[in-house]
Image (cartoon, grey):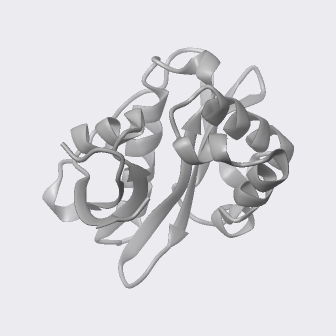
Amino acid sequence: MLENRYVEMIYHLAEQPQIEISLPFGFEVKDLKHANKDELYSCYYAAFERGDARFFFKQSEVERREYFNTLCLNEARSEPGSSVILNKGRSISFTYILPYGEGNCHISCMCVHPDFQHQELGKFMLHHAIREVSAQGHSSITLGTDTKMSAFHLYQKHGFEIMEEKES
């Protein structure tokens, strides 16, 4: 396995079966356009603060907010597959999808608040994005991650393949 490396991964939509996954009781999925930016940032911050993304811990508070703003929320709001999971009206998970080249979309950010992890919400969000992107006629979906992050294993397990390795 690769150690401490940043990789770009790809999921070829035509080569993989569509998987239907249900949300656990008490959760609802909505288009990202319905989400509050501050709630999304709060979810992002909690997920990364208690997560394993090395870059997050190297950033100051200002840099964290600036980085979050580079993830293109406004552009993602209108893209099919960009969604938020709510629990009792609170944003607890989200996925940003962006167009990225001919026939491809890119997952700019995907996270689950740590209080709600290990309930298959990440798996749901991933397959929800795949289903929505596929329905739009795209042929692939890409993302970037560090091989030391637990999310890397989620992506690999669900059909994403490494297409490029970069310096982290």
**Residue 19 placement: quadrant:** top left
With respect to residue 26, does 130 lie above or below?
Answer: below
Residue 151 locus on image (x, y percent): 40, 38
Q: Nearer the viewer, residue 150 or 33?
A: 150
| Count of marks overlaid on the render | 0
Q: Residue at left 42%, top 24%?
A: 120
- Quick check: 148 left or right of 81? left
Position of the N terminus, as image quadrant, is top left
Task: State the residue in front, 33 or 101.
Answer: 101
Residue in view at x 72 percent, y 37 percent: 45
Residue 3, relative to residue 33: is it above or below?
Answer: above
- From the viewer's perspective, tell me whether residue 145 is left or right of residue 116: left
Comparing 122 with 82, the one in front is 122
Q: Is residue 30 visible?
A: no
**Quarter of the view holding residue 92:** top right
Q: Where's residue 114, x and y in %?
A: 60, 22
| 136 or 3, nearer to the observer | 3
Residue 146 visible within the image: yes
Residue 129 in the image: state x and y as whole percent: 45, 51
Identified at 41% across, 38% down, the residue is 149
Place of residue 32 in the rendered image (x, y in percent of width and height, measured from the top left)? 68, 51
Report which quarter residue 76 is drawn in: bottom right
